[in-house]
Amino acid sequence: MKLMIAFTALLAGVMLSSCGSSDDTLAKSQLAKIARDPESVEVRNVRRAAEGNSHVICGEWNGRNGFGGMGEWARFALNTNSHSLTTPEDDSDTVTKEVIAKTCDGTPYSFE
């Protein structure tokens, strides 16, 4: 009986820990397509936001730059239906930052 309870608890823990992993995996695979070093892509703060009839995966991503070091974290938005990815080209790309803020946060981007 104790073995069965322990196994059930272990199985429940594995199932709960994998809930967000499909979003992480989808985000990483799409971001790897634009990264300089696809294997270095990392994501954090990944969550879903509703947009019309589809969902958008929002979060931050990072990867190795041309010098071999990790770059700065940048926000992204990924439509789960079309797999269209939105991420700023650089720090001056305020239009894309505004789109991501409206989609992911529901608030306008602050240009400060």
Image (cartoon, helix red, strand yellow):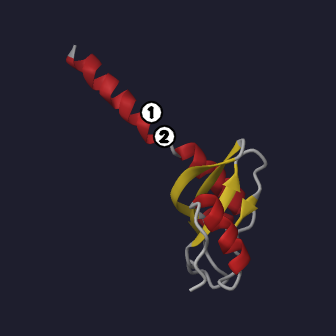
Q: Identify the residue at image location x=69%, y=80%.
A: 94
Residue 15 badge? 1
Graded by Cα atoms within 10 Å as few (under 14), some (14 to 19) or many (20 or more), the crowding at tag 1 reads few
Give residue 71's quadrant in the image: bottom right
Furthest-left residue in this view = 2
Q: Identify the residue at image location x=33%, y=23%.
A: 8
Q: Quadrant of the N terminus?
A: top left
**As drawn, 54 above or below 9:** below
**As drawn, 41 above or below 2:** below
Image check: 24 left or right of 92? left
> What amino acid type is highlighted by mark number 1?
Met
**As drawn, 44 above or below 89:** above
Residue 18 badge? 2
Closer to us: 108 or 43: 108
> What amino acid type is highlighted by mark number 2?
Ser
Q: Residue 79 placed where, x, y %? A: 71, 52
Q: Residue 58 placed where, x, y %? A: 59, 57
Give residue 31's quadrant in the image: bottom right
Furthest-top residue in this view = 1
Q: Quadrant of the C terminus?
A: bottom right
**What secondary structure is marked by label 2?**
loop
Closer to us: 108 or 38: 108
> Is any atom of residue 36 visible in this view?
no
Label 2–label 1 contact, CB within 8 A: yes
Closer to us: 52 or 38: 52
**As drawn, 7 above or below 59:** above
Graded by Cα atoms within 10 Å as few (under 14), some (14 to 19) or many (20 or more), the crowding at tag 2 reads few
Q: Residue 76 placed where, x, y %? A: 64, 64
Q: Residue 5 placed where, x, y %? A: 26, 20
Q: Identify the residue at image location x=60%, y=80%.
A: 68
**What secondary structure is marked by label 1?**
helix
> Is any atom of residue 55 visible in this view?
yes
